[in-house]
Image: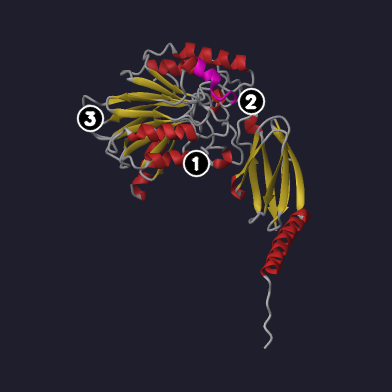
Amino acid sequence: MNEMDRRDFLKLAGMGGVVFFSGLGTLVDAIGKSAAADDFFFVQLSDTHWGFEGAQLNPDAKGTLQKAVAAVNSLTNQPDFIVFTGDLTHTTDDPQERRKRLREFKDIISQLKVKNIRLIPGEHDASLDNGAAYKEFFGETHYTFNHKGVHFITIDNVSDPRGSVGEAQLVWLGDTLKKIDKNAQIVVLTHRPLFDLYPQWDWATRDGDKVVTLLMPFKHVTVFYGHIHQEHNHFTGHIPHHAAKSSIYPLPAPGSVAKRAPIPWDPTAPYKGLGFREIDTRPKQNDCVLTEYPVTKV
Amino acid sequence: MKKITIRPEIIGIFLIVLVVGTGYSKVCAEQQEQVIKMTAKKFEYSPKEITLKKGVPVVLEITALDRLHGFFCPDLQIHADLLQGKVTRIRVVPVKTGVFAFHCDIVCGDGHEDMVGTITVKE
């Protein structure tokens, strides 16, 4: 993708709404959305931080996740499945409280109409106990699944409190990728950015470059992640990385202010900066179409 | 012309003296460098503001008091894991002036994100 195309894409992405995005790294026309039999879409929610308290940042912290669930349920067409890319709960030093929050989160998302739900942890869920409590409720922290010819790979870069993927998982990833055709469409789900987005704010993965190196030989790879509480789009070579909005509070753009402090609640525009996205996956075209939605009912 | 013969064992002794001497000089140089003692605990560094001079080497001696912490200053390329109860020594030679943030990059609890500090480098 040349720089002009990239700028155009970022401009479109920054406006929200619908963005067509090719796994080949080329922007495609938003008009003429196809509906081939093997097309499908899924929803990405991220950074719900259940258990967070802080009226200045979100006076409806105990109700926003439920609103997001209602918003997804209100979509005219329901997705094939729903992914949560980490920080399901807000961190706590108390192991019992952590389990209570995970249990409550699980209860709330059970209200989703779509029952095919895929989750991964964020550092708030898993870094203080290496993912132990998370696994009790949701099972493995890294795994694969296939859907209509698309290979989904989840990467855990939070159970190690250092924010590393680690050698064992890198070996697993390498072995997994050996079984996948180089022309296949691959979607990677993870929590932290796999590239050095802004290490000054801990927006990086220590060994994320090793993951990207393993993915580079594959032509159609797209990464979806969370952690930074805002929409963000970036390329490493031909691989696009898309960060999702949070449904608890937004964070400032990387490096835009001195401190990584959450953006305060705006009473004139409640829930501003919060949301979820729909990802329309078109295996035949090897591309994705991203549609951003507010966290309140669609 | 008189031929001078140097016995191999004398060369060996000379080399040993040279190597040990170089090492000794290095140790002496490091001993003369300023040492800044720091502590790290949930969720603060002490001191959390450090002032250094550009080009002047210092040694940060950081003790993690309560658990594993990190020390990461990306702009000055300083990165270390701080093991609990151990003194971690980091030699720093600042190559540019400015105010550079550092933070704990090993998740350590509810408050981890506030575990930050700054290094100010002056001319």
Say whether residue B117 is left or right of residue A16: right
Residue A204 appears left or right of A39: right
Stretch of the chain drawn in magenta:
A128-136
Does A103 sit above or below residue A270? above
**Residue A84's spot in the image, x, y percent?**
44, 23
Mark 2 residue element: loop
Q: Up-down: is A68 above or below A290? A: above
In the picture of the structure, the residue carrying the numbered disc 3 is A34
- Nearest to the observer: residue B79 or residue A59: B79
| Number of marks in picture | 3
Dot label at residue B29: none
Select label 1 or label 3 by which is in front: 1
Q: Label 3: few (<14), some or many (≥20) within 10 Å?
A: few
| Circles 1 and 2 on the same chain | no
| Chain containing the residue with disc 3 | A
Q: Which residue is mark 2?
A: B110
Name the residue located 41 percent from the left edge and 25 percent from the top edge: A143
**Amino acid at the residue labelled 2:** Asp
The residues bearing labels 2 and 3 have C-alpha atoms spaced at a distance of 46 Å
Q: Can you tell which mark lies on residue A197?
A: 1
- C-alpha span from label 1 to label 2: 23 Å
- Which of the two discs, 1 and 3, labels the residue nearer the N terminus? 3
Q: Which amino acid does the dot numbered 3 rest on?
A: Ser
Q: Nearer the viewer, residue B71 or B31?
A: B31
Q: Residue at x 43, y 38 (%)?
A: A211
Q: Nearer the viewer, mark 2 or mark 3?
A: 2
Secondary element type, mark 3: loop
Kind of residue at badge 1:
Leu
Do the residues at pointers 2 and 3 share their chain? no
Q: Is residue B122 visible?
A: yes
